[in-house]
Image (cartoon, rainbow, N blue to C red):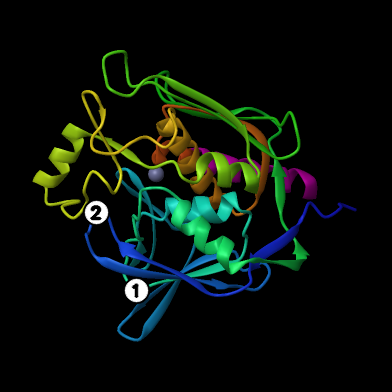
Amino acid sequence: MSSCWRQQRTISSVVRVDGFGYWSGRDVCVEFRPAPPDSGIVFVRTEAGTARHIPARAQYRVEVPRRTSLQDGGVRVDMIEHILAALGGLQIDNCEIWADSPEMPGCDGSSWPFVAALDAAGVTRQAACRRHWSVRRTLRVGDQRCWVEARPATRRGLTVECQIDYGPSGPIQQQSLTLAITPQAFRQELSAARTFILEEEAAWMRSQGLGTRVTCQDLLVFGERGPIDNPLRFPDECVRHKMLDLIGDLTLAGCDLSGYFVAHCSSHRLNAELVGRLLAEQARDCLARTA
Ligand SMILES: [Zn+2]
């Protein structure tokens, strides 16, 4: 008989976050609502009086550059990773996220506005046990330059080691950080770390008509001498944000993970590939147990 890993959790009241989508520039209102045990994280897209549900699970992920998006039928939710990181980081397992526009609010480029709202909502423990899975052998995706790896756990829970390396000449230094992920560690060490972009990438996006509403105050835009018109919140804010993104993407596995995860120059695409490998491995474990 297996003992309960931990009890599932939801929020205690409804809270909302308003803002606009970085890519689309569209206003959006997002409402976080409590949800019953075993319902998971579910996005609910409202439009013209209809409500369409999209579970935050790996099978609904669609590949879109530089962000995490889900699609079911013709309905899509875009740039969901910082919301997922807030929910995953705080161990909120069951929650409905009602959104009146496809793209989630960019806010300040971090998970902090969502964490502040969820903290204000409060947490309710639920009777059901949270599903949990331990990495038993090393799984790796990517190539020599950029890769993400899941190694067997050295302790109970999730530990992440994250590294970034944009080369010796750019404005973003090499950075490395290792952290045992708990709600408190996520809140204090990762949630306020903002997304970042190079000045030339920002210029290219604007030339394509994307992100035209975003200013240097809405996220970190790195020029030759560092972030433009915006002080860093942490000296190593970039690697912290990469770790935040990974925490968000791992929630698509739909269970707690125990393992030592290493991400070297990771991306949403690689994070998703690793989640695919983890789920395939889980399915193998399940088959082996029932054989
Ligand atoms: Zn991000």
Mark 1 residue crowding within 10 angstroms, few (<14) / some (14–19) / many (20+): some
Residue 156 at x, y percent in the picture? 76, 38
Residue 92 at x, y percent in the picture? 62, 59
Question: Is residue 78 one of those drawn in magenta?
Answer: no
Q: Nearer the viewer, residue 243 or 73?
A: 243
Under circle 1, the secondary element is: loop
Query: Is ligand 1 closer than 8 angstroms to the Cβ of mark 2?
Result: no
- The residue under the point 59% across, 46% down is 279
Please tell me in which quadrant of the rendered image residue 66 appears.
top left
Q: Which residues are magenta?
A: 274-291
Residue 121 at x, y percent in the picture? 58, 68
- As drawn, the residue found furthest toward the bottom would be 49
Taking 167 as reference, is 87 left or right?
Answer: right
Taking 162 as reference, is 203 left or right?
Answer: left
Q: CA distance from mark 2 to mark 1?
A: 16 Å
Q: Is residue 132 visible?
A: yes
The residue at which mark 2 appears reads as 23
Residue 34 at x, y percent in the picture? 59, 73
Q: Amino acid at mark 1?
A: Asp
- The residue under the point 19% across, 36% down is 201
- The residue under the point 61% across, 53% down is 90
The residue at which mark 1 appears reads as 100
- As drawn, the residue found furthest toward the right would be 1
